[in-house]
């Protein structure tokens, strides 16, 4: 592991990164020695696992203190530089790419903290084009993709299954790029009108949107497509779900930003242990939880809390060891986390079990084949030591939205309310500061706001969506729907790849 010491902490880490470039491996043990560009252009690893850095850089307290006061944008650069060797993206280029990616957010500081009554601090991550936290990592990741594609005159096809926010963010970040096509599948009728319009109102030639299914149904044909290595290789197929390591990597930065701003570390003496920070996260696919756990491994004393809605697989797994899907995905007021396959838990398992790829492979293959796995008690105890959980009903979501408004005149989105419920119902240590992750703007979830009896003035950009033309294709449900959808998506991937080849030069 890389360790920074003394007054040269940041430079020391960068130097080590250059001498020993960061390499990546699969959580299932079958792939080692890939570089950042390799994993950026990949979805799942060829052995079915997920990519992780072979070593996680551990930062000294001096480095943590030295980062306090950095803007979020500069913090993203520092974090990314730990995982992207300068041989692949020189520091000056990295600064430009991140700066450009984050320049279009609606607040100059990119994200901000709402400091409310009774120690309720809400980290707002939703000031990008699609009003969701996904924009933070997606804009940077697409810039990295575009950087490599331009340098090598290559092209790629992004395939995304979305439970609501990821698809719109991928589309808005990549729209109009001639070397990158985006194919998105979303569950029509299970997301909000604003989420849907962020996808289907984009008419650029490189955007291809399909509708139907539920979020977890969508994952099945997509996994089969990514497992076809000939398809992946010949058509430049890749993922921009939080399967993609770059997405998780950028998400490290907002956990670190929260710690630097809210932990009270500035009050600790240089020879004292750094104070902790409890971070409460609305959880679906568990990408944010994976990022938070990596940050914890990097030396930040975080206490992580994963809050879920009625799709409570993460809660059951931590509290009882029951890692199994329910019969159906439950539709809730927080649709972006209506997920029964928290796929990024694979990354957590890998770290938790000491990078034991064989054990992770056994867990995940059993889960994917049977949709159930019972964690051994020793594994469950390890997990419960690093992750607390809770579950919230729709009525609990509405009650939390109302109470936050009554006490603070602050409107929560229903996903953020899943996290903030914890503030009102759980006992807290007075010596531990807390942060609640706000993953989306309430503007995206007008029905939930209205059900809570609240009013919210919609941004002009949201109102304008109603006036735009739309385009999408239906994926019809059939007896053999998984194979039918796989064939339909395969045909689209092949056709957009052929169209790019016919255009000749990918970038002019």
Image (tube, helix red, strand yellow):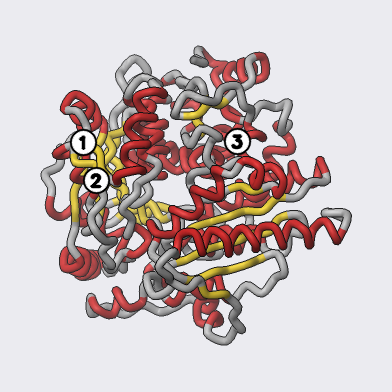
Provide residue 442's location: percent of width, then percent of height. Answer: 37, 69
Q: Residues within 10 Å of mark 3 (few under 14, many from 20)?
A: many
- 243 lies above or below 134: above
Is 208 on the left or on the right of 137, as rendered?
right
Quickly name the residue at label 1: 374
Residue 387 figure quarter: top left
Q: Can residue 117 be seen in the rendering of this structure?
A: yes
Provide residue 209's location: percent of width, then percent of height. Answer: 58, 68
- Could you tell me how far apart the alpha carbons at marks 1 and 2 are, in whole angstroms? 8 Å
- Could you tell me how far apart the alpha carbons at marks 1 and 3 are, in whole angstroms? 30 Å
Write the residue at 30% across / 44% down: 370
Quickly name the residue at label 2: 324
Q: Of helix, strand and loop, which one carries label 2?
A: strand
Tell me whether circle 1 and circle 2 mark residues in contact (CB < 8 Å).
yes
Front in this rendered view, residue 101 or 46: 46
Counting every numbered tag in the picture gives 3
- Could you tell me how far apart the alpha carbons at marks 2 and 3 are, in whole angstroms? 29 Å
Residue 39, label in figure? 3
Write the residue at 22% across / 64% down: 397
């Amino acid at each position: 592991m890389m360790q920074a010491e003394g007054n040269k902490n940041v430079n020391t880490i960068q130097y080590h990164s250059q001498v020993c470039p960061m390499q990546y491996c699969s959580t299932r043990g079958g792939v080692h020695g890939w570089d950042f560009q390799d994993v950026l252009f990949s979805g799942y690893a060829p052995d079915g696992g997920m990519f992780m850095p072979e070593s996680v850089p551990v930062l000294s307290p001096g480095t943590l203190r030295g980062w306090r006061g950095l803007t979020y944008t500069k913090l993203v650069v520092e974090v990314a530089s730990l995982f992207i060797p300068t041989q692949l993206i020189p520091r000056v280029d990295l600064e430009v790419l991140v700066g450009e990616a984050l320049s279009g957010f609606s607040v100059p500081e990119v994200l901000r903290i709402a400091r409310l009554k009774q120690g309720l601090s809400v980290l707002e991550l939703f000031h990008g084009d699609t009003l969701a936290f996904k924009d933070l990592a997606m804009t940077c990741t697409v810039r990295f993709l575009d950087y490599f594609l331009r340098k090598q005159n290559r092209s790629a096809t992004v395939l995304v299954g979305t439970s609501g926010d990821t698809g719109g963010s991928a589309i808005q970040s990549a729209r109009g790029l001639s070397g990158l096509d985006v194919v998105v599948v979303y569950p029509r009728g299970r997301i909000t009108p604003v989420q849907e319009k962020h996808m289907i109102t984009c008419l650029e030639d490189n955007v291809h949107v399909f509708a139907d299914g539920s979020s977890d149904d969508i994952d099945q044909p997509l996994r089969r497509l990514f497992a076809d290595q000939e398809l992946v290789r010949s058509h430049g197929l890749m993922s921009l779900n939080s399967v993609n390591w770059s997405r998780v990597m950028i998400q490290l930065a907002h956990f670190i930003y929260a710690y630097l701003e809210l932990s009270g570390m500035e009050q600790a003496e240089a020879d004292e242990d750094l104070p902790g920070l409890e971070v409460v996260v609305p959880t679906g696919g568990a990408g944010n939880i994976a990022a938070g756990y990596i940050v914890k491994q990097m030396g930040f004393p975080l206490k992580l809390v994963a809050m879920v809605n009625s799709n409570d697989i993460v809660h059951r797994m931590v509290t009882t060891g029951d890692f199994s899907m329910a019969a159906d995905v439950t539709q809730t007021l927080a649709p972006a986390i209506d997920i029964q396959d928290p796929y990024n838990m694979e990354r957590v398992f890998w770290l938790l079990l000491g990078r034991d790829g064989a054990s992770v492979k056994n867990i995940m293959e059993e889960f994917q084949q049977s949709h159930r796995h019972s964690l051994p008690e020793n594994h469950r105890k390890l997990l419960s030591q690093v992750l607390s959980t809770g579950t919230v009903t729709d009525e609990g979501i509405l009650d939390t939205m109302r109470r936050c408004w009554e006490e603070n005149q602050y409107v929560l989105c229903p996903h953020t309310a899943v996290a903030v419920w914890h503030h009102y119902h759980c006992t807290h240590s007075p010596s531990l500061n807390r942060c609640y992750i706000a993953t989306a703007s309430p503007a995206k979830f007008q029905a939930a706001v209205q059900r809570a009896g609240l009013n919210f003035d919609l941004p002009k950009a949201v109102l304008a969506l109603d006036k735009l033309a739309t385009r999408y294709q239906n994926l019809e449900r059939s007896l053999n729907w998984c194979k039918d959808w796989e064939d339909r998506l395969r045909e689209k991937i092949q056709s957009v790849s052929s169209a790019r080849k016919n255009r000749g030069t990918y970038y002019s």
